[in-house]
Amino acid sequence: MPLPQKAVIHELGPREGMQIEKQFISTEQKIRLVDLLSKCHFPEIEVTSFVSPKWVPNMADAAEVVAGMTRHEGTRYTAIYLNTQGIDRALATGKLDMEGVLSVTASEAFSKKNTNRTIEETFAETEKRIGMLKDRGVPADQVSVMAAFGCNYEGTVAPDRVVKLIDRLMAMAMDHGLTIKLIQLADTMGWATPSGIQRLVGPVQDRWPDIPINLHLHDTRGLGLLNAFTALKMSVYDFDSAVGGLGGCPYAGFKGAAGNIATEDLVHLCLEEGIETGVDLDQLLEVARVAEEIIGRPLPGKVMRGGSLPASRARLAA
Amino acid sequence: MPLPQKAVIHELGPREGMQIEKQFISTEQKIRLVDLLSKCHFPEIEVTSFVSPKWVPNMADAAEVVAGMTRHEGTRYTAIYLNTQGIDRALATGKLDMEGVLSVTASEAFSKKNTNRTIEETFAETEKRIGMLKDRGVPADQVSVMAAFGCNYEGTVAPDRVVKLIDRLMAMAMDHGLTIKLIQLADTMGWATPSGIQRLVGPVQDRWPDIPINLHLHDTRGLGLLNAFTALKMSVYDFDSAVGGLGGCPYAGFKGAAGNIATEDLVHLCLEEGIETGVDLDQLLEVARVAEEIIGRPLPGKVMRGGSLPASRARLAA
């Protein structure tokens, strides 16, 4: 398959990057990061997560971060909310692009660990969630399967299982008159491989040929960009990523969630392969360096150290 | 193209990893690294470089490292030597598998910076080198082109230029009755991309269909494993790499040479895609952690932190 001409890249750094940090990142620095990212022209920046600070201390200032950031035209500013309280706090900011995701985890063990619910309980909860979103006029137009490729507690996940879970979410959406516009497959614990991508993306495309797939990839075993490229070659063009490869902890060992693929490395790959993203790479590389400074440890992104090839060529041509 | 069934992986960590380090790594630790790598069953370990310690201080103890290491059956132990003095020192150890590489750089600027010779002067020197190798009974059966994909001082290198350089090396080899068994394409400064791999590997395979290609890839811009996989899909099965991704300096900025692709990440990818390497991954992951301890800073290899998928599955099955 030829590569797609355009890719849509969702920047998750401010949300996914901060939630894993043990130290509290100041509200001012969080706002600084979002505002710098706004200069890169992303279609979406996921700003924060309205969850209990008891579980995620760095999200205690979610409302303040949203209040303090400056919205730029052309970018959607989104957030995560898992319950009524969260969605109401997000709505109260009056500054977010509200969206509803119907999400389920493909691994029973991880579902319990991560959300304290079985998969069945998650489906029951999703019914309630749809009502809650409808009541507030928030469009629910995405479905998402976490741990879609494998799980540290259950091993490789069979593609057939994921397809069935999506099927149920789709049926539920249809019952409620919702139109699903995106299917997210999240490789939450970095189990995807090139052939794993092919084994899952293929059947999902076959079953829902008109709904684009979003891939949320972690770089736990160094295969992140290879997995993204494998998907690009299958016409997938919608990806999550985090500036600098934020989100990981280099010392977390086996169970540690590694960071998302580094946005600037993905944008750089796209540029080199002739795929338009609309993202300003030079600006983004500056932000990656600032992100590293804010987090206070080296981030795994490579291009911020190696220098981009387009910039190298431009410098040589000058 | 289907993936090859087997891949040949040359471990360069002890040589390529040490040469870039500013601090002197003790002879004892260098021997320790080689001996641990010997337990992984590599077809080849590049042990050291017989070059002037004036230029590469960490290679001052090259002879001592070779004297101290223990050879394991099934592994070839090689070294680098750039002149008569170097080759004689390597021969004097009596413990190395001697091999001759006819090498040229595709970038004029980098040739001068790296070897203090123009490309033309390198060809003249190669004539002398062949004689020197012949006199000592060292087989010269490889050709190599450095900076084959691009150069920080000249930009992207045209594939046609690389093919012509190989052509000249091949003609020279033929004049001297040599049989070339391997063509190395080295991405010395990390300019390769998936389409760059296709643009160069394709024509080289077309011109020399019976000679295997070796790829020496650096991960400067995070594309190392993707480039390797792109080549695997073109039936290339011979790769250089370095345990832990040794060889890089995370703070060297634009001109810094990033490390080779991390051997354990490449072996892991091969395993997951059903490509046999003969390398013991569990043992290698242990060595990667020791390499990090010896070097004294975090290395970029990912699987050593994320855990291998085969080991995860085995643990879950137990």
Image (cartoon, coloured by chain):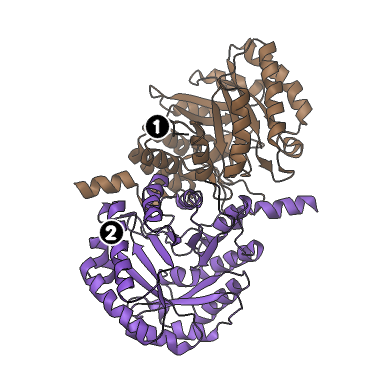
Chain colours: A purple, B brown
The reply to the same-chain question for discs 2 and 1 is no
User: Residue at (20%, 47%) from the top-left corner?
Assistant: B317
Q: Say if residue B252 shows up in the picture.
A: no
Q: Position of residue A145 (x, y in %)?
A: 34, 63
* In-image side of B143 versus B305 (left or right): right
Q: Identify the residue at the far left of this view.
A: B318
A145 left or right, relative to A290: left
- For the point 56% across and 39% down, which residue is it? B217
Where on the picture, by quarter, is residue B122?
top right
* Residue B202 can be seen in this image: yes
User: Percent from the top left, x then y, of residue A209?
Assistant: 42, 57
Q: In the rendered view, would you say A235 is above or below A37? A: above
Q: Nearer the viewer, residue A167 or A73?
A: A167
Q: Chain of mark 2?
A: A
Classify mark 2: helix, strand or loop.
helix
Label 1 resides on the chain identified as B
Residue that numbered label 1 is attached to: B277
Residue at image point 46% right, 68% down: A17
Q: Counting other residues with Cα less than 10 Å from the Cα at mark 1, is it few (<14), some (14-19), or many (20 or more)?
A: many
Residue A211: quarter of image: bottom left
Q: Nearer the viewer, residue A219 or A107?
A: A107
| Picture coordinates of residue B177, whole percent (x, y) | 64, 9
Which dot marks residue A164? Answer: 2
Residue B227 spot, x, y in % from top left? 54, 42
